[in-house]
Amino acid sequence: MSAALTLATPDHLARLLPLVAAFHAEAGIASTEESREAGIAPLLAGEPYGCAYLIGPPRAPIGYVVITFGWSVEYGGLDAIIDELYVRPGVRGRGIASEALHAVPRALAGGGLRAIHLEVDRDNPAALALYRRAGFTPRDGYMFMSKPL
C-alpha cells in the first residue's frame, strides 16, 4: 500500500469528508457535518491559507493530511502546520503515515517553506514516536496554546 499524495480538489470533497468525520470521532473532536465541510471545502477550492492531500489512491483514499500556512519571523518566512493527519485504522502500522510525513515536505519544497510544525498529545507515545522518526522534535520550554474565537 502506498502513501502517494494527491493534492485534493473540490472533486475529492465527498471522499474526504468521511475520513475527516472518522478522524474527529476517533480523536474526540466535537464537530458537525457543516463545520467539517466549512473547514475543508475552501482548502480544496484553492484557499491560499492551506491545502489537503489525499493519502493513497484518489478514488479510494486511505487517509489525508491537512496543511495550513503561516509566516514566521523566527524561521525566516513561510511556515506550515500539519493540522490533521489521519490514516484508516485498518491500514495502520504499515509505514503509511511515516511515508506521508516524509512526502509532505517534498511536495511543498518548491514553495519556499522554511519550517513545518505540528501539535501532538503528550500522552500518545505512538504518535510521538511516529513524529520523531519523521524528524520532528519538541521545542524545549514551548507548548502550543489556543484561544477559540
Image (spheres, helix red, strand yellow):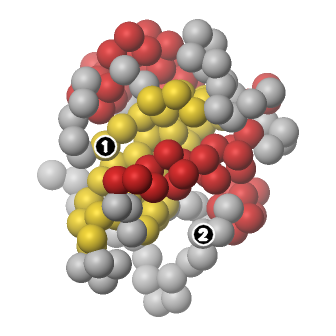
Is residue 47 left or right of 80 when viewed as pictured?
Answer: left
Residue at 39% x, 69% y: name it.
114
Residue 87 placement (x, y as % from top left)? 66, 34
Q: Which residue is situated farthest in the bottom direction here? A: 141
Residue that sits furthest to the left in the current view: 149
Q: Which residue is mark 2?
A: 136
From this view, report whether residue 120 is shown above or below residue 60. Answer: below
**What residue would you read off at disc 1?**
50
Kind of residue sitting beneath label 2 = Phe
Inspect this view and state whether residue 125 appears.
Answer: no
**Are there few (<14), some (14-19), or many (20+) residues within 10 Å of tag 1?**
some
- Residue drawn at the location 29% of the way across and 32% of the way down: 43
Residue 143 horizontal/vertical position (percent):
43, 76
Instruction: Using a 10 Å C-alpha cutoff, classify the residue at mark 2 as few (fewer than 14 neighbours), some (14 to 19) or many (20 or more).
Output: some
Q: Which mark is residue 87?
A: none
Query: Is 145 situated above or below 149?
Result: below
Query: Which x, y percent locates residue 21?
Result: 49, 24
Image vertical order of residue 61 relative to residue 109, above or below = above
Which residue is painted at 34% across and 78% down in the image? 75
Reply above or below: 71 against 73. Answer: above
